[in-house]
């Protein structure tokens, strides 16, 4: 039996992660329309990872015999000024998700819910990686985005990203 607040936050995180997937699908859509297939591929895989995150929260609640309430997924942000605005929106979103994970962790810590804290440890690490990835993309775009040949190379590099299932198995 999980604490009510911890349960609510974990349940809400299912929706937040699906929203993340939706947001990154929108990013992928943006870059596809610009002819930057590598960037589109990178965000498509990011969307798949976010879907996996949502399912992990879902499974964790199921494994603990807790009820799950699925809510509507919000319309993703659109209308970006340029590619850099998309990348910056990605970083801002990841920082927000990190704050959400931290909030759940703090709630679990308060009630000595060590099982949930252990489950969340993987996400704490994952968020560190996601923030690094988002920052790296911004740095690369700052360095190479204004030169067409360099942008082509960066697009090629991002096109090589492949999907891997999450290392956390419940
Ligand atoms: Fe599931 Fe990008 O955090």
Image (cartoon, grey):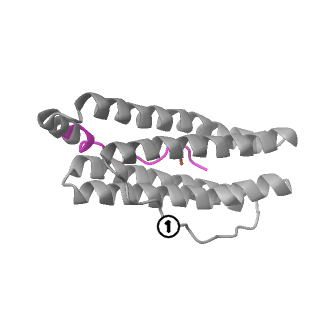
Which residue is drawn at the image coordinates 50% and 55% (left, top)?
20
Answer left or right for 73 relative to 81.
right
Instruction: Let me know if residue 167 appears in the view.
Output: no
Expressed as whole percent of the image width and height from the top left, the position of residue 23 reads 45, 57
Q: Is residue 109 magenta?
A: no
Q: Is mark 1 within 8 Å of ligand 1?
A: no
Q: Identify the residue position indicated by label 1 in the image.
A: 75
Most foreground residue, 161 or 133: 133
Expressed as whole percent of the image width and height from the top left, the position of residue 109 reads 81, 38
Magenta-highlighted residues: 156-170
The mark tally for this picture is 1
Most foreground residue, 35 or 116: 35
Residue situated furthest left in the rendering? 149
Give neighbour class at mark 1: few <14, some 14-19, many 20+ (Cα, 10 Å). Answer: few
Residue situated furthest right in the rendering? 111
Instruction: Let me know if residue 121 appears in the view.
Output: yes
Expressed as whole percent of the image width and height from the top left, the position of residue 84 reads 34, 42
Which residue is drawn at the image coordinates 43% and 32% (left, top)?
135
Which residue is drawn at the image coordinates 82% and 54% (left, top)?
5
> Where the N terminus falls, by quadrant?
bottom right
80 to 126, vertically: above or below: below
Most foreground residue, 55 or 104: 104
170 to 65, vertically: above or below: above
Expressed as whole percent of the image width and height from the top left, the position of residue 86 reads 38, 48
Most foreground residue, 170 or 43: 43
Which residue is drawn at the image coordinates 65% and 41% (left, top)?
99
State the SS at label 1: loop
Answer left or right for 19 relative to 2.
left
Answer left or right for 57 relative to 9.
left
- Predominant SS of the magenta segment: loop
């Amino acid at each position: 039996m999980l604490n009510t607040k911890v349960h609510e936050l974990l349940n809400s995180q299912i929706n937040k992660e699906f929203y993340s997937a939706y947001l990154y699908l929108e990013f992928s859509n943006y870059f596809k329309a610009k002819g930057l297939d590598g960037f589109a591929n990178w965000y498509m895989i990011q969307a798949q990872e976010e879907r996996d995150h949502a399912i992990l929260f879902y499974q964790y609640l199921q494994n603990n015999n807790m009820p799950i309430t699925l809510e509507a997924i919000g319309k993703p942000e659109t209308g970006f000024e340029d590619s850099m605005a998309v990348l910056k929106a990605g970083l801002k979103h990841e920082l927000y998700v990190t704050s959400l994970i931290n909030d759940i962790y703090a709630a679990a810590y308060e009630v000595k819910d060590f099982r949930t804290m252990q489950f969340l440890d993987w996400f704490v690490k994952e968020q560190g990686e996601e923030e690094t990835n988002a920052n790296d993309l911004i740095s690369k775009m700052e360095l190479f985005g204004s030169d067409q040949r360099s942008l082509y190379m960066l697009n090629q590099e991002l096109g090589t990203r492949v999907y891997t299932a999450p290392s956390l198995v419940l």
